[in-house]
Amino acid sequence: MHVLTLEKLAKDGLLAGKRVLIRSDLNAPHDENGRITNETRLVASVPAIRTALDAGAAVMVMSHLGRPTEGTVTPADSLAGVARRMGELLGCDMPLVADWVDGVKVGPGHVVMLENCRCNVGEKKCNDELSKKYAALCDVYVNDAFGTAHRAQASTVGVARYADVACAGPLMAAEIDALTKSVEEARHPLAAIVGGSKVSTKLTILSNLAEKVDRLIVGGGILNTFLLAAGKPIGKSLAEPELVDECRKVLAVLAAKGASLPMPVDVVVAKAFSADAEHRVADVDDVAEDEMILDVGPKTAAILADILKSAGTIVWNGPVGVFEMAPYAEGTRVMADAIAEATDKGAFSIAGGGDTVSAVHQFGIADRVSYISTGGGAFLEFLEGKKLPAVAVLEERAAQ
């Protein structure tokens, strides 16, 4: 994936005096009192804005917040609080501009926040007229919102078609680079971990990755359905028996290309879904009817760790057990340590998805993973093999 970057424009001196419109992802969670509870996206968006300001540009920042009704802006929809906090993070005033579609006043070296773009009529449907109005606001359009890259909307795709210059911000560029390294330009052996409660939500990912990887590790309820496909007892574990045939298709694709999906030899089971429930390590063939599988066992964890330690590239999306509960966290912890060790030795690793990022931080390996993706839905759609619309349009513009 090759795109023009904001960093290159800045280095070439092409931003001074220019009007720069940055699409950021500032959709931060808020509590019932309107206070921001997680600033990760805000902090990640600072470098793009700072780069443009330092280069002497007049900067406009647009973002969405929540899922507002187009045509109205309620207090809950407003980016006022986000604008205040972003100003603090940037160390400068960041006024909020309402009704900005037909024009914005901002001078070089200054920055404004544009009110919630999803409140604009036509935003979500990528209305052509609205897209052209966005483009008319700027000399340079910058998409730095990877978390919305799977959305074909006016602020992510439409404006990029019509702006004089369209490029990727540092966060978007880093995501594109990491995703390219993880699959399209992967160093083999390529290992992928796909965890989660349901095969149905990850079936497209499993099918796509089966075509590309050397080792496919599955965990959680997904693993239970694969165990059913292999004829193993799973007791009362969460599974989707109706998708057993789909699991067998994935296994057949892997087998046809000499790849594999390692099955567990032991599992951690309990009679109730609780951290306090009595639990035991069972042979994979010895799960009782009244037991549920909540983690892989120590022998299996060691096998998976060996696979990961020898990998050249690791793509991680989902834990292998109920890691939020201490008795069922060991499998994911051992796997996390193995990913960190492989990365230390030169492997490229990328982790994405809410539960995965939580596990990365819980087990203290955030600084030992090559890249942690900021885009949940966009990351998953990339793993499904889908073309991300916001990335595709930047590639098209770069090729012109």
Image (cartoon, rainbow, N blue to C red):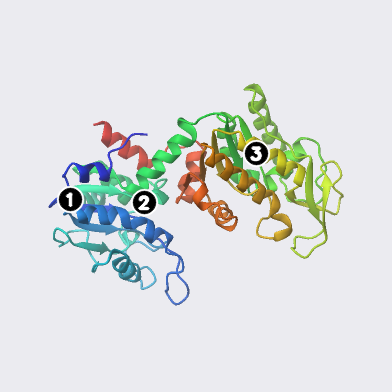
With respect to residue 304, does 319 lie above or below? below
**Labels 3 and 2: the sequence-earlier one:** 2
The foreground one among 208 and 2 is 2
Q: Quadrant of the image for the C terminus? A: top left
- At label 2, counting other C-alpha atoms closer than 10 Å, the crowd grade (few under 14, some 14-19, many 20 or more) is many
Does residue 23 appear in the picture of this structure?
no
Dot placed on the residue nearer the N-terminal end, 2 or 1 = 1
Q: Where is residue 64? Give x, y as percent.
A: 36, 59
- Of circles 2 and 1, which is in front? 2
Mark 1 falls on what kind of element?
A: helix
In the rendered image, residue 204, in percent from the top left (x then y), is placed at 57, 38
Q: Is residue 185 left or right of residue 90?
A: right
Look at the numbered disc 3 and give the secondary structure of its residue.
strand
- In the rendered image of this protein, does residue 305 appear above or below residue 96? above
Three-letter amino acid code of the residue under disc 2? Ala
Q: Look at the picture and state if 212 lies above or below 153.
A: above
Instruction: Judge from the rendering whether residue 124 lies leftward or rightward of residue 289; answer left or right.
Output: left
Measured along the vertical axis of the image, is residue 74 above or below residue 196?
below
Residue 217: numbered disc? 3
Front residue of 103/233: it is 233
Most foreground residue, 128 or 138:
138
Left/right of residue 106 with respect to residue 191 in the rendered view: left
Instruction: Tell me the number on the disc at residue 136.
Output: 1
Residue type pointed to by label 1:
Ala
Residue 43, image x and y in percent?
38, 60
Residue labelled with disc 2: 145
